[in-house]
Image (cartoon, helix red, strand yellow):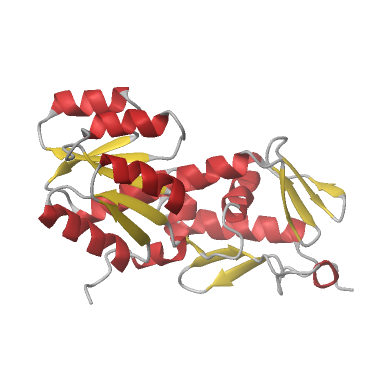
Amino acid sequence: MAKRLLPEADRWGAKILLTDGDPATTRSVLQLLEDSGHQVEVASDGVESLQRLFQFRPDLVIIDVWKPGVLGWELCRRIREVTGIPLLILKSKGDDATELQALAWGADLCVDKPFSPALLLARAHALIRRWRLAGMAGQQAVTVGSLQINLDRHEVTLAGKPLDLSPTEFRLLSALAARPGQVVPHRELLSEVWGSEYSAEDVYLKLYICYLRQKIEDDPSQPQYILTKRGVGYCLNDRVSLMEARGA
């Protein structure tokens, strides 16, 4: 099995629809995505891509702009007519006209071929993360045990009592709540909450996890809500019960 470039991507388990373009590119992208823990469907042309879009319900669509039957930007237009799902375009290097056309018809990002595998994965994960967070934003609240996070109002309550969280604390808690039960790596939390330039500053993350636990946990030394995966990241425990959370 090929060495995984980004082992932390395993937790995503995203569903990705890949349009079949150049055979060598398709094989390379398919292996890269599957080795990173994603479920991938390959569509042979534009018509099949649209069919799979409704059947497979992917988190991301990756399109080779020169498709048999339907040009990539035309496929973008058709997808955009029915959904806001993120679209990542693979295009020839230096083909600015195609990139402008694809972006005009709703593509989110373009990646030049030949591409860096690490860069392609990073951009794919950024789009998936944005899509899932946007989906969360459509929910009025996320509830775990006796903890309720109101995303629209930027309010958090514990057993019905409001918690006074700083903006940074709320962003960090929301980032964990975006995927309850899943371990979110340190670098990703740092990038989401503080920005990519802080992706190596673990001290910020540890400090604010401590702040959150002081406000949320009955006993911060034995947390029930925010769990640590040593050497990997943190997780919002989606299996905590009301009785466990309040020490009953």
Which residue is more in the foreground, 98 or 238?
A: 98
Q: Residue at x 45, y 60 (%)?
A: 12
Which residue is more in the foreground, 231 or 74?
A: 74
| Side of 138 where 5 appears, left or right | left
The residue positioned farthest toward the bottom in the image shown: 1
Q: Is residue 184 visible?
A: yes
| Side of 124 where 169 appears, left or right | right
Q: Residue at x 49, y 53 (%)?
A: 189
Q: Is residue 57 visible?
A: no
| Side of 219 where 195 appears, left or right | left
Res 98 quadrant in image: top left
Q: Position of residue 89 (x, y in %)?
A: 25, 39
Q: Residue at x 81, y 72 (%)?
A: 244
Q: Quadrant of the C terminus?
A: bottom right
Q: Position of residue 216 (x, y in %)?
A: 75, 58
Q: Residue at x 51, y 74 (%)?
A: 230
Q: Position of residue 241 (x, y in %)?
A: 79, 69
Which residue is more in the foreground, 148 or 25?
A: 25
